[in-house]
Image (cartoon, rainbow, N blue to C red):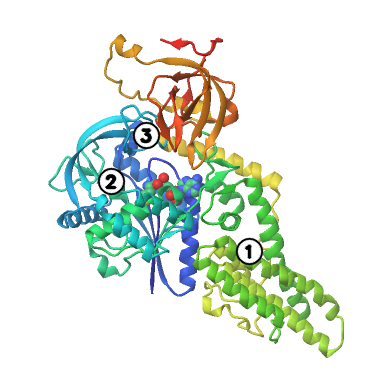
């Protein structure tokens, strides 16, 4: 029985951080769970290397795109190896097998009549690599708010518009195709709104997979990247490996549409089987904020692993955050969870149980059926946890295991083995056997259930219990499998308490070193918080074509005073402002500056507003004007402002 799962393939123009690690850890946990169930589980991960962004990043450090990508792909590999979460295969989009697979899939789509050559003229956001449909020249990018550029080029198009019905039918017939439910609804709504054909090649980019016989066309990002999943299953020879269709694509929520709409459509067009399940998890926030380079609040995993080990992080991420929803990371919460759940909870139950078995039964598991209440609870826990894992509800599975741990703790306190041990009566001795056996059996079952999440820690505990170190299997999780007469191994604390006052500063210090190391790879300067981040742009973007003064005076820029600012629901880059430019009422303006500015930082601030732009709606909100900001590649926007006091409404010319 095979189980094929994938992480997204990560862009090589950035370095791995805790967000990428979150997905990869979750995939590793699922792979271990599936292996525990007896599946031959294979995890594919990899690197997404082509495109303008990598070309630019490479140029910045004076490397070829290939050499630069190799260095960054190795950076990802090194992380996953070091953290014990390496995939069974690592696909690079620059690998020849991948190139062959992309070209092969394209040809199948073309042979089946789903590809045509056309001309694209439209608005394009260079920063997000995004074609903005229904936009006019000068309109802002709906993702980042930066002005889009008009481009005209010959492209190959994929007839996505022909797949609306088939996709809707897919979501209907396979309700688990896209999960969780919120994402499924979002995708269905989107597809119901109609689909445009998709441009899948570029002639302006060199760093990409060539379209055979159609040079200089190269495949464009998503047509290239998604196919890596198939490359990992054998590419054109997928039938030989038997791993396709994939059982699960695990992704972050921002790339749902590509996976739930484009990808099945490409496969349908090529006449290939569709993946069974796409699951989108939420975002990992750092102390309530979205992690971003411009905020300088990205957390790296290695410093955490160096100070606490990787397993507390695995446990924390999968326990603390409801999988599928956004969740928060903080060093404090990590250490607190570790101490309360691992050191005090599981660790303590194991060590007191082993200490009592050593003390009262010479280190040997006594003969007993165990306590029937505990047995019943354990049996239910196994069922609940396995079902929850199946649904990828990690936190629920872990909650169930910890309820069993607390129950066992309470049971020991109530049974008072230290009193029973003093009694000469046979009934007491039997009760003591029952108590010790039950506690040990809970440790065995709990550690079995936890092995997908904290495999090495539970292997240590199980060795102390006298068990073999092989990863446990699901069929052994039933009550009573613990053999009487088993000799305990040498015992020692597996989760020593961690002092937050010592560990957190250590992790923060190491983080600085790690940031500097990664920045050196990327040729970046010091990472600085928000506004200071822009120093890193060294190459000037090409100037726009010259205009006359008459052109310039057409643009009416005014001094405005921000009266209110609030987030835009569902658009984490946008803020909704009301700006007074001296008119009867403040203007409603939607600006793509939410990653760089908090609403409260803006209120009362004087800004420059392009006041005579055609109003338009962004996310359903009227935007009547554009706020002027320095907008730099790779950095957050910086608002233009005034050093001297200026009256509201003054014109800039
Ligand atoms: N290359 C594309 C994916 C192509 S898949 C065919 C890409 N790469 S990425 O490097 O930007 O990685 C995005 C993925 O990293 C997300 O989908 C998610 O799995 C993970 N995460 C990156 N930052 C994250 C958070 N802050 N929180 C949670 N996961 C995040 O998109």
Q: Quadrant of residue 287?
A: top right
Placement of 382 over or under 115, stated as above or below: below
Q: Where does the N terminus fall, quadrant-wise?
A: bottom left
Counting other residues with Cα less than 10 Å from the Cα at mark 2, is it few (<14), some (14-19), or many (20 or more)? some
Q: Is mark 2 within 8 Å of ligand 1?
A: no
Q: Quadrant of the C terminus?
A: top left
Of all residues, the one furthest to the front in this rendering is 584
Q: Nearer the viewer, residue 176 or 507?
A: 176
In space, the residues marked 1 and 3 are separated at their CA atoms by 42 Å
Q: Between disc 1 and disc 3, whose residue precedes? A: 3
Q: Nearer the viewer, residue 466 or 215?
A: 215
- The residue that mark 2 highlights is 196
Between residues 430 and 375, which one lies in front from this camera angle?
Answer: 375
Image x and y of residue 456, in percent:
56, 64
Q: To which residue does mark 3 refer?
A: 127
Q: In terms of secondary structure, where does tag 3 sit?
A: loop
Asked whether disc 3 touches disc 2, contact meaning CB atoms under 8 Å apart, the reply is no
Check disc 1 and report the residue beneath it.
399
Q: Give the quarter of the image for residue 355.
A: bottom right
Determine crowd level at label 3: few under 14, some 14-19, many 20+ residues with C-alpha closer than 10 A: some
Left or right of residue 206: residue 554: right
Please, which residue is most extreme toward the bottom here? 426
From the image, state whether disc 1 or disc 2 is nearer to you: 2
Going from the N terminus, do you reach mark 3 or mark 2 first?
Answer: 3
Task: Please provide percent x and percent y for residue 262.
Answer: 31, 52
């Amino acid at each position: 029985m095979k189980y094929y799962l994938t992480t997204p393939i990560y862009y090589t123009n950035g370095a791995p951080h805790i967000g990428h690690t979150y997905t990869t850890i979750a995939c590793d946990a699922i792979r271990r769970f599936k292996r525990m169930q007896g599946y031959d589980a294979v995890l594919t991960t990899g690197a997404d290397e082509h495109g303008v962004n990598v070309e630019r990043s490479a140029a910045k450090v004076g490397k070829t795109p290939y050499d630069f990508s190799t260095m960054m792909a190795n950076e990802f590999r090194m992380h996953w190896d070091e953290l014990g979460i390496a995939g069974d295969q690592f696909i690079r989009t620059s690998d020849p097998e991948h190139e062959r697979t992309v070209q092969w899939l394209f040809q199948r789509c073309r042979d089946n009549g789903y590809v045509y050559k056309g001309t694209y003229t439209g608005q394009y956001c260079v920063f997000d690599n995004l074609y903005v449909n229904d936009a006019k020249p000068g309109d802002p990018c709906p993702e980042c708010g930066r002005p889009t550029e008009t481009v005209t080029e010959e492209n190959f198009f994929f007839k996505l518009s022909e797949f609306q019905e088939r996709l809707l039918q897919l979501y209907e017939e396979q309700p688990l195709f896209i999960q969780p439910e919120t994402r499924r609804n979002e995708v269905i709504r989107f597809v119901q709104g109609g689909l445009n054909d998709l441009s899948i090649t570029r002639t302006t980019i060199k760093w990409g997979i060539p379209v055979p016989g159609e040079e200089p066309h190269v495949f464009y990002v998503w047509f290239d990247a998604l196919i890596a999943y198939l490359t990992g299953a054998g590419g054109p020879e997928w039938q030989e490996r038997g791993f396709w269709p994939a059982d699960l694509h695990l992704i972050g929520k921002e790339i749902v549409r590509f996976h739930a709409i484009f990808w099945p459509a490409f496969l349908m067009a090529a006449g290939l089987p569709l993946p069974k399940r796409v699951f989108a998890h939420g975002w990992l926030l750092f102390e309530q904020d979205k992690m971003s380079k411009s905020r300088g609040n990205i957390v790296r995993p290695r410093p955490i692993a160096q100070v606490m080990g990787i397993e507390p992080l695995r446990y924390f991420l999968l326990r603390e955050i409801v999988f599928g929803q956004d969740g928060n990371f903080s060093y404090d919460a990590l250490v607190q969870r570790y101490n309360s759940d691992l050191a005090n909870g599981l660790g303590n139950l194991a060590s007191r149980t082993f200490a009592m078995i050593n003390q009262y039964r010479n280190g040997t598991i006594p003969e007993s059926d165990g306590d029937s209440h505990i047995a019943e609870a354990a049996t239910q826990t196994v069922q609940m946890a396995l079902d929850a894992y199946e649904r990828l509800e990690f936190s629920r599975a872990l909650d169930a295991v910890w309820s069993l741990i607390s129950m066992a703790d309470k049971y020991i306190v109530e049974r008072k083995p230290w009193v029973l041990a003093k009694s000469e009566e046979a009934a007491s001795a039997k009760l003591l056997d029952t108590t010790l056996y039950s506690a040990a059996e809970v440790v065995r079952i709990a550690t079995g259930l936890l092995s997908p999440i904290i495999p090495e820690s539970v292997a240590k505990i199980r060795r102390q219990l006298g068990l073999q170190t092989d990863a446990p299997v699901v069929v052994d999780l039933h009550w009573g499998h613990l053999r009487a007469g088993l000799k305990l191994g040498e015992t020692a604390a597996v989760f020593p308490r961690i002092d937050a006052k010592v560990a957190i500063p250590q992790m923060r210090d190491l983080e600085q070193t790690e940031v500097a190391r990664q920045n050196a790879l990327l040729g970046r300067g010091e990472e600085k918080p928000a506004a200071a981040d822009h120093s890193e742009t060294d190459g000037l973007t090409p100037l726009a074509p010259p205009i006359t003064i008459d052109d310039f005076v057409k643009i009416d820029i005014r001094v405005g005073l921000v009266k209110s600012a609030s987030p835009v629901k569902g658009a984490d880059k946008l803020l909704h402002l009301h700006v007074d430019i001296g008119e009867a009422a403040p203007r409603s303006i939607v600006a793509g500056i939410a990653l760089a500015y908090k609403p409260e930082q803006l209120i009362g601030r004087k800004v420059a507003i392009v006041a005579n732009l055609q109003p338009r709606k962004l996310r359903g909100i009227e935007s009547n004007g554009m706020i002027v900001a320095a907008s730099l590649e790779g950095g957050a926007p910086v608002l233009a402002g005034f050093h001297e006091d200026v009256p509201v409404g003054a014109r800039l010319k």
